[in-house]
Amino acid sequence: MNGRLQLGHLVVRRHRRLKTLGTVVRFDGKDESGASRAWIRWSHPTTLPNPSLEPVDDLDLVEDQEAPEARGDGTRTKS
């Protein structure tokens, strides 16, 4: 589990094919196996369901927390 995740953090789904960017909007306790879960609102318009409930262990924290929407051009830069 990544204890650094907080509400509003940008994350990327760790799945080998689905590297979708999203924002943590709520934490939702643990699943039946004891893994922590979070509700993530995905930035990709065709990702469904949106938001979705994801195991925290399947998420990677984005180090550069500047939202692409705030930049206005949909791109991200490294600081």
Image (spheres, helix red, strand yellow):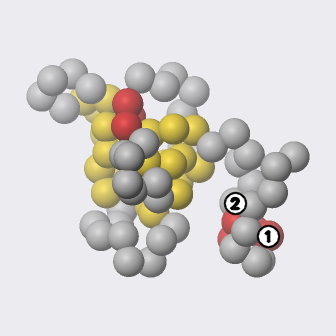
**Tag 2 near tag 1, CB within 8 Å:** yes
Residue 13 appears in the rendering: yes
Q: At 69% from the left edge and 39% from the top edge, which residue is drawn?
A: 63
Q: Is residue 25 visible?
A: no
SS for dot 2: loop
Disc marking residue 71 = 1
Q: Amino acid at mark 2?
A: Ala
The percent coordinates of residue 48 (x first, y second) are: 30, 70
Residue visible at 59% across and 49% down? 10
Q: Quadrant of residue 49?
A: bottom left
Can you give x and y, in whole percent of width and height, for residue 43 in the image?
Answer: 51, 67
Element type where label 1 sits in the image:
helix
Q: Is residue 35 left or right of residue 67?
A: left
Report whether 42 appears left or right of 11.
left
Residue type highlighted by circle 1: Arg
Q: Looking at the rendered structure, which numbered label has been put on residue 67?
A: 2
For label 2, count other residues whose C-alpha is less than 10 Å away and answer few (under 14), some (14-19) or many (20+).
Answer: some
Residue furthest to the right: 79
| Residue shown at 37% from the left, 37% from the top | 58
20 left or right of 57?
right
Residue 14's x, y, as percent? 42, 42
Locate the N terminus and report the quarter of the image it occupies: top left
